[in-house]
Image (cartoon, helix red, strand yellow):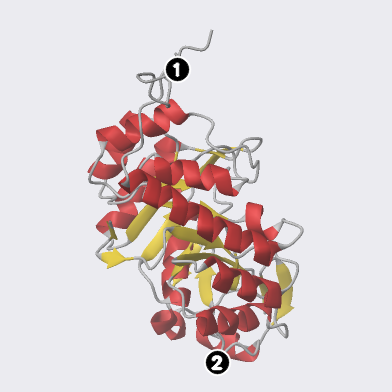
Amino acid sequence: MNILVNDETHVVTAGTLASLVAELGFSEARIATAIDGEFVPKATRGQHALAEGMRVEIVAPMQGG
Amino acid sequence: MLFYGTRLSSPLMLGTAQYPSPAILSSAVREADAGVITVSLRREAAGQRAGQAFWSLIRDLGVPVLPNTAGCHTVKEAVTTAHMAREVFETDWVKLEVIGESDTLQPDVFGLVEAARILCSEGFRVFPYTTEDLVVAERLLAAGCEVLMPWGAPIGSGKGLNNVFGLRALRAHFPDVPLVVDAGIGLPSHAAQALELGYDAVLINTAVAKAGDPVAMARAFRLAVEAGRLAYGADPMEARDMASPSTPLPGRPMLG
């Protein structure tokens, strides 16, 4: 199915946000996630089923002022 | 002054953006003896690990981190960003920015108060980037903020303290609230001035990162905040309009 990850279309087999994070190689990474603009804590990623066209945001530490 | 129960090792809060290299950033943070460093969140591309490398760099610095909500223009964006930052950086401190105007990056103080109310009720320790407006400051404190961060001048402008009267009034009005001048500081003398006014800290980024020699400028700011803090504690003289001779007049020889 097609999922929009950080504004780029990815064709993924993952069924949940947790497995999408793993599929993209972020399992061990320090990141935070959101689906359709709503924050999804790490502990609940496995309970969030993905659906065609969902918008997923994956963010990581970055320099800031 | 305590910031949510924490005594900072230095009144210098340093941003981590815009440095020529990670090595120069690290050296600048050390040379500044920064009490806090500010950080942010951005999208991480699959296969790239820019964020992970940065995380390991700031962890090695061992300085408390203050994540920001830079770039957020709505309450919802800012609140969601704060939640993501809390998970990533493992801190409930957040520098809350809700930007209201693009040319000046002036805070949207109405959205700021609302976002602060939500985040404080959720257990965040909010450091609001605000203006020097006294009434907004009252509302932020009522919303649960225990620190205020008024701007000196627009972010990145380097213009220093644009409204010294307003900043002085804020200090006088809230003697027990930790106050930080955030944004607009361009020179060490601006930082010294903020501390001389009795401010508890300054937050600086561009002035150090975009200097020709960021590490030397970081040291200059460290010395400036030390001087400013000492001066405030030493109870500065009052300015006056007319001259007052410093050399005693009695005993002056009559030579004319």
Where residue B98 sits: x, y (%)?
Answer: 49, 46
Q: Nearer the viewer, mark 1 or mark 2?
A: 1
| Image vertical order of residue B98 relative to residue A62, above or below | above
To the question of a shared chain for discs 1 and 2, the answer is no
**Chain containing the residue with disc 1:** B
Q: Tell me the kind of residue under disc 1.
A: Pro
Where residue A15 sits: x, y (%)?
Answer: 55, 86
Residue farthest along the top direction in this orientation = B256
Q: Is residue B58 left or right of residue B122?
A: right
Residue at point 52% right, 58% down? B223
Kindly state the secondary structure of the residue where label 2 is placed: loop
| Image vertical order of residue B59 relative to residue B33, above or below | below
Q: Is residue B119 left or right of residue B182?
A: left
Residue B128 visible in the displayed image:
no
Where residue A17 sits: x, y (%)?
Answer: 53, 81
Rendered-image quadrant of the C terminus of chain B: top right
Q: CA distance from mark 1 to mark 2?
A: 83 Å
**Chain containing the residue with disc 2:** A
Q: Tell me the kind of residue under disc 2.
A: Glu
Where residue B242 sits: x, y (%)?
Answer: 44, 13
Residue tagged 2: A28
Residue B88 visible in the displayed image:
yes
Q: Residues within 10 Å of mark 2 (few under 14, many from 20)?
A: few
The label shown at residue B253 is 1
| Nearer-the-camera pick, B159 or B4 | B159
The label shown at residue B79 is none
Rendered-image quadrant of the N terminus of chain B: bottom left
